């Protein structure tokens, strides 16, 4: 994925101006910036949910605007909100998302994915009864179903996770990068990811409002 | 990207697959929240039963206004239930995920309308003959009422969903939906109630049904695309 001369605006405020970004296979990029700097806005633009004020986004050499639905199968976006329904069980919630996104949705893969994030025990519990951290794990379990999807966009994935959760996610991200995938994530806390070493993209400098 | 590039990233999701998954999910959610799901039907029955109490029990008058009352209450029941159609999905982030899925958002829009119709339109159609009886409607008139609602309630779901998508995320969206949709839904109301009146006067209601059918086709072709576009704008 490549973005050039990107400008992102939220309301009247220009958050990001003239940002050039290239995400290469096998890398993890850490998008850093203080609150309100436009990290989430940038991710939403890259995911095609919002449109950029200026500049263009290209995925695999094709313009994101023209590619349409087929492009959306090239990335997974785990947003700040988990996208789970309170009245479904963890398994059902994940199954719905997997089915919608064309990921493996059979019970075995789903259970395996939930176990991978250490939440397999509670797979039949209603999402309503899960804690914030457990919900985050369920949402992130989708990544384990999406190993073949090249690009992962993760908005504050480590939010609400305990140390085991962070370790599990680090492993998942590390494995994905090692298999040639590419990850762009935001995080307030310093990353404990060791392999691969995350590339740093700091929004502090260019975002002169 | 060697490995990830050689194989397809995710298997293609068919149009019907999306439709089925979203409808099945909405039905399952409704079955977990039965009281919420039954509210439109309860509103429909209670509102209709107020009319004989309010205007007096004169059989002739009740027969004349029965179909109109049923239609107006069906319209209001649909509007009241449609405001939460996308709002809950927006607040927990699932709407965003649905829009990000690798398929056209039109399938999603259509699925949400179909779900809404199955959960509110269909129960109203089933209840309509019963409440129609309390207005003293004759057999053929009841048949015309049900036939009209069969064609008309999907129109209400489609238009209601459009209103809900347009007002998504706004404060006092409930009132706005009603203001936007009611004028659009008047033709369905006129022909639906008109069909019953025509049958009561001993004529064929075929013309009314044809017009309702035409309205349904036009709405079904136009509304889902408009809903999809409105959802994209609302989530931006």
Image (spheres, grey):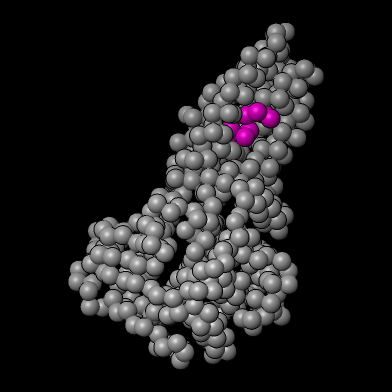
Q: Quadrant of the N terminus of chain A?
A: bottom left
B115 drawn magenta: no
Q: Nearer the viewer, residue B128 or B65?
A: B128
For residue A145, say whether it is visible. yes
The correct choice, above or below, for A32 with respect to A38 in the image is below
For residue B35, say whether it is visible. no
Name the quadrant containing residue B218: top right
Our reading of the magenta stretch's main secondary structure is: helix
Q: Nearer the viewer, residue A174 or A90?
A: A174
Which residue sits at x=54%, y=83%?
Answer: A175
Q: Would you say A99 lies left or right of B95 here?
A: right
Q: Quadrant of the C terminus of chain A?
A: bottom left
Which residue sits at x=69%, y=77%?
Answer: A112
B154 drawn magenta: yes
Which residue sits at x=55%, y=86%?
Answer: A171
Which residues lie in the magenta part?
B149-156
Q: Would you say B175 lies left or right of A209 here?
A: right
Q: Would you say A195 lies left or right of B22 here?
A: left
Count the marks. 0
Report x, y in % for residue A176: 52, 79
Report x, y in % for residue B153: 63, 33
Report x, y in % for residue B136: 76, 21
Q: Nearer the viewer, residue A26 or A98?
A: A26
The correct choice, above or below, for B85 with respect to A93 in the image is above
Taking the view exactly as shown, the residue that stands out farthest to the left is: A208
Taking the view exactly as shown, the residue that stands out farthest to the right is: B139
Which residue sits at x=40%, y=75%?
Answer: A24
Name the quadrant containing residue A3: bottom left
Report x, y in % for residue B45: 70, 36
């Amino acid at each position: 994925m490549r973005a050039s001369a990107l400008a992102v605006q939220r309301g009247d405020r220009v958050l990001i101006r003239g940002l050039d970004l290239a995400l290469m296979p096998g890398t993890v990029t850490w998008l850093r910036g203080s609150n309100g700097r436009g990290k989430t806005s940038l991710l939403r633009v890259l995911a095609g949910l919002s449109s950029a004020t200026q500049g263009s986004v290209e995925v695999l050499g094709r313009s994101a605007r023209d590619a349409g639905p087929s492009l959306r199968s090239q990335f997974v976006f785990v947003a700040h909100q988990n996208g789970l329904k309170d009245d479904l069980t963890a398994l059902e919630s994940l199954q719905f998302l997997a089915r919608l996104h064309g990921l493996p949705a059979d019970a075995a893969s789903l259970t395996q994915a939930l176990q991978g994030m250490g939440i397999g025990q509670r797979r039949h519990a209603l999402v309503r009864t899960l804690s914030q951290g457990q919900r985050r794990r369920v949402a992130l379990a989708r990544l384990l179903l999406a190993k073949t999807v090249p690009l992962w966009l993760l908005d504050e994935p480590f939010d609400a996770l305990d140390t085991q959760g962070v370790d599990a996610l680090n492993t998942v991200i590390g494995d994905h990068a090692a298999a040639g995938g590419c990850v762009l994530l935001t995080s307030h806390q310093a990353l404990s990811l060791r392999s691969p070493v995350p590339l740093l993209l700091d929004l502090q400098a260019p975002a002169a409002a | 990207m060697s490995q990830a590039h050689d194989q397809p990233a995710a298997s293609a999701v068919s149009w019907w697959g999306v439709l089925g998954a979203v409808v099945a999910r909405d039905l399952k959610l409704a079955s977990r929240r039965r009281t919420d799901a039954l509210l439109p039907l309860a509103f429909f029955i209670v509102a209709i039963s107020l009319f004989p109490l309010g205007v007096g029990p004169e059989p002739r008058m009740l027969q004349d206004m029965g179909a109109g009352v049923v239609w107006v209450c069906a319209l209001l029941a649909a509007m009241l239930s449609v405001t939460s159609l996308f709002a809950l999905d927006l607040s927990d982030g699932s709407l965003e995920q649905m829009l990000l899925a690798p398929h056209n958002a039109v399938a999603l829009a259509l699925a949400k309308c179909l779900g809404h119709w199955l959960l509110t339109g269909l129960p109203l159609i089933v209840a309509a003959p019963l409440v129609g009886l309390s207005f003293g409607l004759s057999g053929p008139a009841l048949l015309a009422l049900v036939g009209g609602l069969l064609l008309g309630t999907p129109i209400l779901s489609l238009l209601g969903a459009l209103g809900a998508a347009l007002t998504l995320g706004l404060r006092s969206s409930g009132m706005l939906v009603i203001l936007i949709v009611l004028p659009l839904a008047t033709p369905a109301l006129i022909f639906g109630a008109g069909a019953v009146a025509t049958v009561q006067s001993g004529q064929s209601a075929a013309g009314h049904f044809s017009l309702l059918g035409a309205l349904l086709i036009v709405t079904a072709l136009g509304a889902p695309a408009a809903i999809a576009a409105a959802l994209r704008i609302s989530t931006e």
